[in-house]
Image (cartoon, coloured by chain):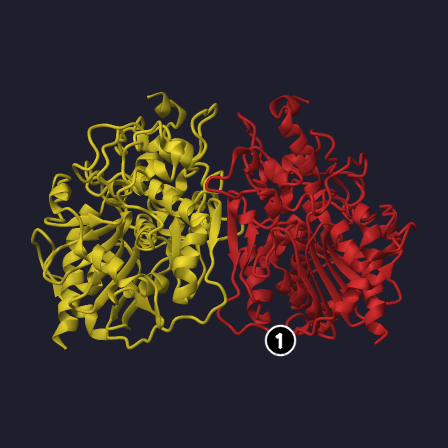
Chain colours: A red, B yellow
Amino acid sequence: MVFATKFPGRSLVALAAWAAAVAAPGMAAAQTPTYPDAAASDPVAMGWMQGVPPPPERTIRFEDLSFMQFPQTRWSFSHWRELMPTAEVARGDGAVGALPVRLREDLDTVSFIPLGGGAPMSWRQSLDANYTDGVLVMHRGVVVYERYFGALTPAGQHLAHSVTKSFVGTAAAMLIAEGRLDPEAPVVRYIPELADSGFADATVRQVLDMTTGLAYSEVYTDPASDAFDFIRAAGLMPRPPGYDGPRTTFDYLRTVKKAGRHGQAFAYKSVNTEVVGWLAARVSGQPLAQVLSERFWKPMGMERDAYLHVDSSGAGYAAGGLSLQLRDLGRFCEMMRNGGAFNGRQIVPAGVVADIAAGGDRRAFASAGYSTLPGWSYRNQWWVSHDDHGTFMARGVYGQACYVDPKAEMVIVRFASSPQASNSLLDPLSLPAYRAVAERLMAD
Amino acid sequence: MVFATKFPGRSLVALAAWAAAVAAPGMAAAQTPTYPDAAASDPVAMGWMQGVPPPPERTIRFEDLSFMQFPQTRWSFSHWRELMPTAEVARGDGAVGALPVRLREDLDTVSFIPLGGGAPMSWRQSLDANYTDGVLVMHRGVVVYERYFGALTPAGQHLAHSVTKSFVGTAAAMLIAEGRLDPEAPVVRYIPELADSGFADATVRQVLDMTTGLAYSEVYTDPASDAFDFIRAAGLMPRPPGYDGPRTTFDYLRTVKKAGRHGQAFAYKSVNTEVVGWLAARVSGQPLAQVLSERFWKPMGMERDAYLHVDSSGAGYAAGGLSLQLRDLGRFCEMMRNGGAFNGRQIVPAGVVADIAAGGDRRAFASAGYSTLPGWSYRNQWWVSHDDHGTFMARGVYGQACYVDPKAEMVIVRFASSPQASNSLLDPLSLPAYRAVAERLMAD
């Protein structure tokens, strides 16, 4: 509560909004205020950050937390590097991996019934309803749908939020496949600095699949939640005067304590991904941004450099710091659909992709109680549906998605800036829409 | 002095080092401590920011000002975006403007006598003596020499410091040539926000040529110097607890008062360039990063995106915030040598280049007393030698240079991270070296 006095008024509102930024799906559903719709919150029409300087009431800043308030997020998610330090994820100078395009207008009219029922909605309507900033559909390796809204341009980079986790988890799984990382080893074999933390007896597999038992709360409606300590340490939020807490992500991880037992239940806690990122970076001997560059950006022929938020010691924010071009997210997800191959190269071993697609422990997942994800599981930082199409996803708050439907030979990638963080609130207009598009494509 | 108590010990040392970062040449010569040489301060060999995380004694941070201390600067000048917010200067997706290469090994042995006398030194020796991070020589449009040292790679971007000013000044001069900016108009015609400042009766020409009379001190050995207020406002330095000064560059500019008369004497004060940047952005209707992209990066076929430090309102740091690839600096300077044409296009009107090359008011310049630049002048944010080769330069502290020698049909561009900020201290081993290379090339 001391915290509240330090961030009074508007800032506290922003704090609650921030909350959502790294919130576990399903956690921010407490209240559902009314927000302006996609057209009314269009960041270009609203004039955010336009003019030199922009007028005060249209200025978005890091230091006052306005960058995490809706509708400012409709601008800031596409301009993250202008708000904080970032490291380049270099594509190198290789040729761009081709993305053939044969657009289909008919997809706009694809119709679906929202999860939980309701009136039918068209695919095109769903894009506005979800505050979509950009969406791309690929079928059999061809782009069949591509649209941009608001502040996102085809060449622009958008914050992927927790979709970042799936890049990091895939890189770690590759290190396992190469024998450089033992999934059954305790993480302290690679990171002795965690010996006095709750991660001391956690295995690599447990942090990868988020089955650790940690005394770490991600309750963003509570300013005393551990999540805010993490966010302040990572440099994702201004620190109050006199702050003497940890100043880096890694220093924060050392303070996390254990609660319960590891390996029992799935519990979505971003600190696990920070350990995965640390493992990948340490075993690779490279900063995380370079790991992502060497593993994906360079060999895949990505179109644009990406970038990764870094903390005050230069560590990349593994849980949600990647900003990348929409088409490049399409390339990544198409590669996963394609058994790990893209641009004429095997990027990820087929076995790694198959292991992810096969999913994790469904029983361990069920206890987390995600209402929109019945029967799903979590593996290597991916969400796996176990549906009849073998669908699996990378998911990030505010509507970020990479949806891989192997049976339909389709991937959908989407960037969004919904006022609602929780994907549990966004899934009702997203998951059935993705499925309906898949079925339309399969019908041809 | 209040300031000193807020930044005690090591930070104060860093403050003095920082000092130099935007210091007027010639101002930081008060004391000359002994520094480790180029080999001993090699940032890769020293292990700065290596390891995940790097060891505390090899970590470079914004918040403790270590990023501005030597030898840490040998790393940080090549990693600026990892320390603070930046905006992309986009190259777009056009073809890269070719840079033909025919390297000449013989240039290493070119010999010269330092300014002020002394033993002859070779070109190759001068590179280490000046803590060169990268250097490229072009003759008649062909790269004849190219080397990288320390933390800079061929694909990397290096902070250009005040070389940034020449990009901004050239863009403004182009707006003048297009009739969109009147050089004789008061700046307040375009920026009424400055009506109560010392810029109120300054003309566009006066800020472009730095002949304003301003109560603005750039004395970096004095923590009470105005320069630190500017730096804090611009977000280039952590702010002390309880800071209630201006929070943006533009807000700071409004506080600058007049001293003496405008148009009388040259006085190198970075705040002039911030006004030039503001003018260019406002008249263009674009943020400064976009101005640089549209004016130079896209039409020139630059090889790499560049980036520009932005303050907390998104304004680009015109006086010294540009980080770019060395080869792209080579392209820019070759374009200036070539009468404004590059990559098959007229980038800058020939008249604008001719006006810059013809120089400014030598008498106004002389009063500033630059010992290494006798007879020079300053025009549109460029330094003009008036020598028999018609040489003109863009110059930045710590050894950044773009040296255009029209008669020798040569340009030299250099990035460096000297422990000495002042170019007056670096010129003795630089200017005669550049001239000697020019003469070798002319002899063929």
Q: Residue furthest left?
A: B117
Near mark 1 (Cα within 10 A), the count class, few <14, some 14-19 or many ≥20, is some
Of B205 and A173, nearer the camera is: B205
- Res B11 visible: no
- Quadrant where the C terminus of chain A is found in the figure: bottom right
Q: Residue furthest right?
A: A117
Query: Where is residue B307 shown, x and y percent of the image?
Result: 44, 53
Query: Where is residue B428 shown, x and y percent of the image?
Result: 15, 52
The residue at which mark 1 appears reads as: A343
Query: Where is residue A101 shown, x and y percent of the image?
Result: 66, 73
The secondary structure type at the circle numbered 1 is: loop
Q: Splitting the image into 4 quarters, where does residue A404 fall?
A: bottom right
Q: Which chain is mark 1 on?
A: A
Query: Where is residue A175 shown, x and y percent of the image?
Result: 64, 64
Q: How many marks?
A: 1
- What residue is drawn where x is 70% and y is 71%? A103
**For residue A49, above or below residue B323:** above
- Res B436 visible: yes
Q: Splitting the image into 4 quarters, where does residue B189 fall?
A: top left
Q: Splitting the image into 4 quarters, where does residue B298 fall?
A: bottom left
- Quadrant where the N terminus of chain A is found in the figure: top right
**For residue B145, above or below residue B414:** below
Q: Amino acid at mark 1?
A: Asn
Left/right placement of residue A53 relative to residue A184 reads left
Of B55 and A383, nearer the camera is: A383
Left/right placement of residue A1 relative to residue B353 reads right
